[in-house]
Amino acid sequence: MSTRPPPRRSDESAGSVFAAGVAAFAGVMLATVSVFQVLQAVAAIGEDDIYVRGREDYVWAFDVSTWGWVHLVIGVIGLAAGIGILTGQTWARVIGIVIAVLGCVTNFVFLPYYPFWAIVVLAFNVLVIWALCTRIARD
């Protein structure tokens, strides 16, 4: 007599594989975006000459070094959340969404200083939000 469990339906296994893939994608993307945020922060904190001085009357016109510290904090927390997502921690998914939303906001506000880079990081953050929300919806 065999004690093997009954075979699973193919759509259940495909769904779990998809969910695991989306979670891995979200974790890797969040870690990557967080490294970008940290690099952006180091450049802003260390050397203000890298960033373009656009319009001085911009609504969110802060010192570039101040933006560097904001990006550094978001990047470090995001990196921890990305690692947590890759290890399967539930708390990390929620923190990851919050950090990705904050990353979107900070990069939108950072647009006058380094437009192309801010748009790229903003787009990556949107992908992270999509992946994490897809993963949460599947659970």
Image (tube, grey):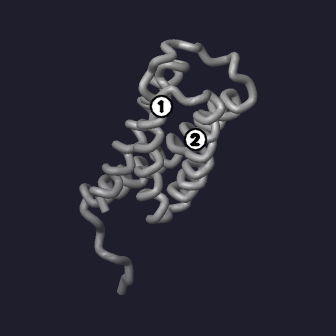
Q: Is residue 107 left or right of residue 6?
A: right
Q: Which mark is residue 87?
A: none
Q: Position of residue 94 (x, y in %)?
A: 41, 58
| Residue 43 at x, y percent in the picture | 69, 27
Kindly identify which residue carries mark 1. Answer: 107
Residue at image position (36%, 86%) is 1
- Left or right of residue 5: residue 71: right
Near mark 2 (Cα within 10 A), the count class, few <14, some 14-19 or many ≥20, is some
Could you tell me which residue is drawn at 55 percent across and 48 percent down? 78
The answer to whether 10 is drawn above or below residue 45 in the figure is below
Residue 70 is labelled as: 2
Can you say whether 106 is above or below 95 in the image?
Answer: above
The residue at the point 46 percent across, 64 percent down is 91
Residue 114 placement (x, y as % from top left): 54, 19
Q: Residues within 10 Å of mark 1 (few under 14, many from 20)?
A: many
- Residue appearing at x 63%, y 40% in the figure: 69
Which secondary structure, mark 1? helix
Q: Reply above or below: 12 against 74.
A: below
Q: Quadrant of residue 2?
A: bottom left
Q: Residue furthest front?
A: 57
